[in-house]
């Protein structure tokens, strides 16, 4: 994989007051901005082109990260306007900046010790999601993962949580207006969630995944940010 997309456009409402003046992915953890952990991991697996979608305090990203040359990357920014476009709209908005091959996606507000090289460069379906054990704040999980690596949206098997990390094909977004009926989909640029497209892929047998049993954190609150920072500084991760 040579292309990656980092979702960084969120308003960080649960992280206030820390995000009143700093976008959540630029908050420091373990001595550096959260998003730098992702950039280092991407550079380590020879990703060369990274798109970062932005909205809240968007100007701070190029100021902090520049063009990515310090990591051997080329960073391009996909500004979404003052209102974020959600995950589906954000991905659709970034497509013109991504190459034709599958691309890696990382949510800018998660941290994990995953080796990104373990993810498939060519997913068998339209997307491959990295799944993790359900955290305390999301006990029900998102999808069930079967022994063949297919994801399902039912409760006949234990459900896992989508980590916010995955590999996607552009085809996942094909004919998206047939699936998305939310009012935001009629806006320009369109604003919509990715979940309905993942559910369509499940029905088509095109959504696959793998389970990462290691460390993972959704850095969604000041408390979780502080806890992760303490563990990193103590060398526990």
Image: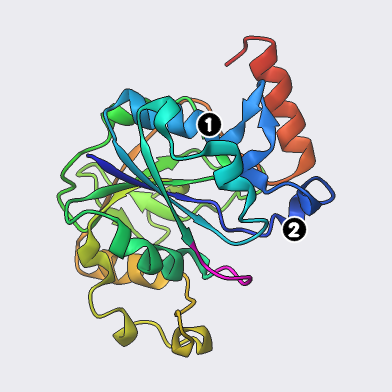
Residue at screen point 69% across, 14% down: 233
Picture coordinates of residue 42 (x, y %)? Answer: 37, 32
Compare marks 1 and 2 and give the one earlier in the sequence.
Answer: 2
Question: With 99 as the anchor, is 20 left or right in this view?
Answer: right
Q: Which residue is mark 2?
A: 13
| Viewer-side residue, 1 vs 119 | 1
Residue at screen point 19% across, 62% down: 205
Is residue 180 magenta-colored?
Answer: no
Q: How far apart are the two marked residues, 1 and 2, measured between alpha carbons?
A: 21 Å
| Viewer-side residue, 233 vs 163 | 233
Give the quarter of the figure containing the C terminus. top right
| Viewer-side residue, 202 vs 86 | 86
Residue at screen point 20% across, 66% down: 171
Residue at screen point 72% across, 35% down: 225
Q: Is residue 153 visible?
A: no
Is disc 1 placed on a helix, strand or loop? helix
What is the span of residues highlighted in magenta in the rendered image? Answer: 79-84
| Viewer-side residue, 66 vs 93 | 66
Displayed quadrant of residue 40: top left
Q: Which residue is mark 1?
A: 36
Question: With 62 as the anchor, is 175 left or right in this view?
Answer: left
Label 2 crowd (10 A; few <14 / some 14-19 / many >=20): few
Is residue 80 magenta-colored?
Answer: yes
Look at the magenta stretch and give its main secondary structure. loop
Is disc 2 placed on a helix, strand or loop? helix
Give the quarter of the figure containing the N terminus. top left
Picture coordinates of residue 118 (x, y %)? Answer: 27, 29
Label 1 crowd (10 A; few <14 / some 14-19 / many >=20): some
Picture coordinates of residue 195 (x, y %)? Answer: 43, 67
């Amino acid at each position: 994989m040579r292309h990656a997309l980092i979702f960084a456009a969120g308003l960080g409402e649960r992280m206030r007051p820390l995000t009143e003046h700093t976008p959540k992915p630029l908050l420091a953890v373990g001595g550096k901005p959260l998003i730098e952990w992702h950039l280092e991991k991407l550079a380590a697996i020879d990703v060369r082109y990274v798109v970062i979608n932005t909205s809240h305090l968007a100007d701070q990203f190029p100021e902090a990260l520049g063009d990515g040359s310090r990591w051997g990357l080329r960073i391009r920014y996909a500004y979404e306007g003052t209102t974020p476009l959600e995950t589906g709209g954000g991905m659709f908005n970034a497509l013109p900046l991504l190459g034709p091959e599958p691309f890696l996606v990382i949510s800018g507000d998660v941290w994990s010790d995953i080796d990104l090289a373990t993810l498939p460069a060519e997913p068998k379906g339209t997307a491959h999601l990295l799944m993790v054990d359900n955290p305390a704040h999301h006990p029900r999980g998102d999808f069930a993962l079967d022994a063949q690596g297919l994801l399902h949206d039912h409760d006949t098997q234990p459900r896992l949580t989508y980590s916010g990390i995955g590999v996607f094909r552009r085809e996942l977004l094909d004919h998206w207006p047939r699936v998305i009926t939310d009012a935001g989909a009629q806006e320009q640029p369109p604003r919509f969630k990715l979940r309905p497209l993942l559910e369509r892929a499940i029905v088509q047998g095109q959504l696959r995944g793998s389970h990462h049993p290691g460390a993972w954190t959704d850095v969604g609150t000041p408390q979780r940010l502080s806890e992760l920072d303490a563990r990193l500084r103590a060398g526990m991760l």
